[in-house]
Image (spheres, rainbow, N blue to C red):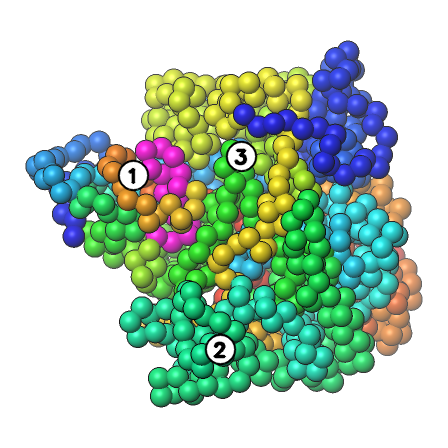
Amino acid sequence: MGVQRSVTTPMGRQQRTGEPDSASFIVKVLLMGELKRLAGRRELLLELPVGSTVHALASELGRVCDPAFGRLALSKEGDLQSHVAVFLNGAQLESMDGLPAPLTGGDIELMLVPMYEGG
Amino acid sequence: MPTFVRGRDTKEQTVERPGAGRRDATDSDWVPTTCRMCLVACQVLVRVEAGQVVNVIGNPDSPNNRGRMCAKGKSGIMNHYNRSRLTRPLRRTNPEKGIKVDPRWEEISWDEAIDAITAKLRQVVEEDPRKLYLQTWADQDFAAWLGALASVVGTPYHQTGISGTCGKTIHSINYLTTGGWWDEVDFEYCNYLIDVGTQQGIATREGFNHAVPDCATARVERGMKLVVVDPVGNNAAAKADEWLPILPGTDAAFGLGMLHVLLNEARIFDAEFLAQRTNAGYLVGSDGRYVRDPASRQPLLFDLDSGTAKTHDDASLGAVALEGEFEVGGQLVKPAFQLLKERVAEYPPEFVEAITTIPASRLRRIAREFGEAAQIGATITIDGVELPYRPVCLNWCRGPQGHKHAWHHTWALQLVNVVVGCINVPGGYQSRATAIGWPDVSWPAVGQDGMMVPGAHSGKHALAFPGRPANRPGRLDLFELFPVAAHTRTFVPEVSKDPEMYGLDHRIEMLIHTAGNQIAGGWADVNAVVDWYKSIDLVVGFAVEINETHELDDIVLPMPTYLESNAFDSQDAVCGEGVAFHAIQQQTVERAPGVREPIEVMMDVYERAGILDEVYLVMNRVLKLKPPYLLETGRRYTHQEVLDRQAKSVYGPEFGWEWFKEHGILVWARGVAERYPGRFIKGRIPIYMENFVDRGEELGVVLGDMGLTWDLVDYDPLPQWIACESYGQLERGEIDAIGVHYKLPYIYGGQGNANPWIDELCEKLPQSYGVLINTRLAGQKGIKDGDWIWLESPVGKSRLRAHVTECVHPQVIGIAGHAGHWAGGKPLSRGKGVNFNSLLPYGTAHMDTISSSIDMCAPLTVRRSVGGPP
């Protein structure tokens, strides 16, 4: 289980509470759109065990954020909903196939992008 | 770098090629761009002489329209050279807002306009970003830039269509069954097409300018049969082999009747496909839920070879039971397919006839013809790859979707395609975008319970499976109360009347919208939508001319026509074709003085609001920009500089914006698997929406906590027919007819017939401004062809000229296009025809509890009017 190392709200200030041990790594999570409002913060740092996936990150977010965040962004099983775009170091994970892949640190952005209706 | 192909692998051109392709004729002044007179977005060549547009023709290099274009596109010239063109920002001085109320515009500078917008934006974002509502249209570039504002400030309200009603179940069901966003018929191989509530292949829809010739070719060369099921004898019905007039709001019954004949009478279904590629074999218990393996929690199927239940992903799974009843874990269970068979058995053609008015014998014959034409078991080899061959398609669209119980109408129809296995295979029901992309092709994956999960190719869409747990709403669109809907913005005007009723403590205070016409053509009851607009402090609209929506704006900003605009748009492909493409839109002539590019205007707003760098952060992701083309903080870019970075990031440095301006379109080859991805996808398609059981129960609890009483009968895993309110009103004799809207090939949305060329067409084609009334109903009412009549609904009344005809269902009034304009900025179209939405009731009672689709049945009384035109 990951440990929340620090929180910044809503933009800018960061506070690290310590360095991760060798069995874990730190990811910076940036929440955009309605996710920011529901989580009550724009950025947070999470410490996750080495080998964690985006699935694991999603579960951890569900744990540390306001429940309203989870109700919009996560399924009952704790997976990210289809309308949440995930960017890993600036590149979008093109499908949910990318989510089980182990993370190796870096910046994670979860972004709500428009849900297109049509014309 | 993509391999640029041109002229090969695309279908043979069927028209003259006067433009030839700009790169081969450097002395030519034909400029390649993309038409934006409707959503179809055909590629065109624009002839420019002495700085003036003198002609627009179809671009023969485009797989999308292959050199063709339509009346709407041609009329773009007159939209551009428009006497009512707006060229200065305007600000309302009359605080009173309403229909036909003069805004008393005053001209203001761009600086003043941007300052006023920025000030209000700062205020609402600081107080509560949910006070901001954004609405864009087909211009995907602008949608992205305005969407970035939503991402940065945190408002959930970004409507990406003119009408919040668009794509309600169309996209949801396409994602579920095809893995893609939008469907087409594979005219290359289809032999039997049923159009239900759509005119695809004849008059309307995506890919219009290639679908029409392809449909004609299929009929002439292969004898493809076309059956049209529609209340109105429209253009498609007029050209069909058979037209089946159907009572509005009964499409589910038609689909269920088709399924009954196929599954229970003729026993025609693709058992192999159903067993291997759908959840038809998943075992369902008496509680409506899957029977699951106790250890893995994966759904179980019954393996006929071993006589035991196995999980869907068990490698030893043999022949799957689709029918019958089995004992598993001490309880009697049935495969989902068995349950579907039992459900559709409730809809024999004789019963369906009583609902739809379609004779049982015709339904039975057509269902059998369709099933036999499917040639289940047949294969075809294309480019050396053997594929299933299912040359049939039941194509449906806005007609069946526009009802109170939209999900069940459209789900029942789509299951006709699923049971014969014609999804994404040659001859069948195709998605344009199941597998698409450059440099990487985005493919559907396998998700929860083995079901298909669409790739991320066309924006992120909220999906019907698995859906979301219901919750108390925090949004005016009640998204949290629609756990399987894609989007629910149809509710915003309704909920805005009394947010507290839903526990909401905010209202929309600022709205920014594009040149669409939401008042005339979005939502329903125009007065209800106007009331919402009136309640908003600051409405900002981008406009080419002042339409009905702009008359309620507080600030109007002049924007370019498509002939003056630049956009990178997105990758696309035509179903079945051996190529994909990326076409751009570019400025062909100097902009009218005073007109500014909306994206650059919004950049000004973002800069003054101090959020431009954050917008860049979002845009770098959304536009897929890569180093060294990332937008850098602290810098300002022109729109064209951004386009160049976008093009080079996606296609490499050789394919920058200048390359696209020169060529207009990039075309590349794609393989058989991308063209016909059906059997290459591992995820399964649902025929049984098991998740509806839990989502419905959870919703019931939340509604109970809120003290709301909603009928949740629609949360049924299997399709059923439930009547619209107007159906009952008609049956009880409370109304004379159901008014329905149908489309004309020369009008798009609420913005067409102000154009002089389109208006001329409408004047010459009398159904455009009149209404269709059946001979029988006209006789009962003493109405003769050409008489003026009154149509009255609970929310409005209109006086129109009647066209007495057999080409409309006897209990239906057919209302075409979008007319009945009243805006001062649309002088040519003012007072002509009827605005359909003015007759359409609106409110929770008229919306689908699954999808939030609005019921498009207008309950009407009809009477002859004395006297001539008003």
Question: Which span of residues is magenta-colored?
Answer: A80-93
Depicted A65 relative to depicted B694: above or below: above
In-image side of B260 versus B193 (left or right): left
Residue A42 position within the rendered picture, expressed as x and y whole percent measured from the top left: 26, 40
Residue B817 appears in the rendering: no
Q: What residue sits 73% from the left and 59% below the top? A: B391
Residue B305 marker: 2
Residue B712 marker: none
| Nearer to the camera, B270 or B815 | B270
Q: What residue sits 17% from the left and 46% below the top? A: A49
Q: Secondary structure at mark 1?
A: strand
Residue A108 marker: 1
Nearer the observer, disc 3 or disc 1? Answer: 3
Q: Quadrant of residue B63?
A: top right
Q: Which residue type does callout 2 highlight? A: Asp
**Residue position marked by numbered label 3 in the rendering:** B438
Residue A39 position within the rendered picture, expressed as x and y whole percent measured from the top left: 26, 48
| Nearer to the camera, B111 or B448 | B448
Measure the C-alpha gap from mark 3 to mark 2.
43 Å
Is A11 magenta? The answer is no
Q: What residue sits 81% from the left and 45% below the top? A: B213
Q: Chain of mark 1?
A: A
Is A84 magenta? The answer is yes
Q: How many marks?
A: 3
Measure the C-alpha gap from mark 3 to mark 1.
24 Å
* CA neighbours of label 1 inside 10 A, class few (<14), some (14 to 19), many (20+): many
Residue A108 position within the rendered picture, expressed as x and y whole percent measured from the top left: 29, 39
Sooner in the amino-acid sequence: mark 3 or mark 2: 2
The quadrant the N terminus of chain B occupies is: top right
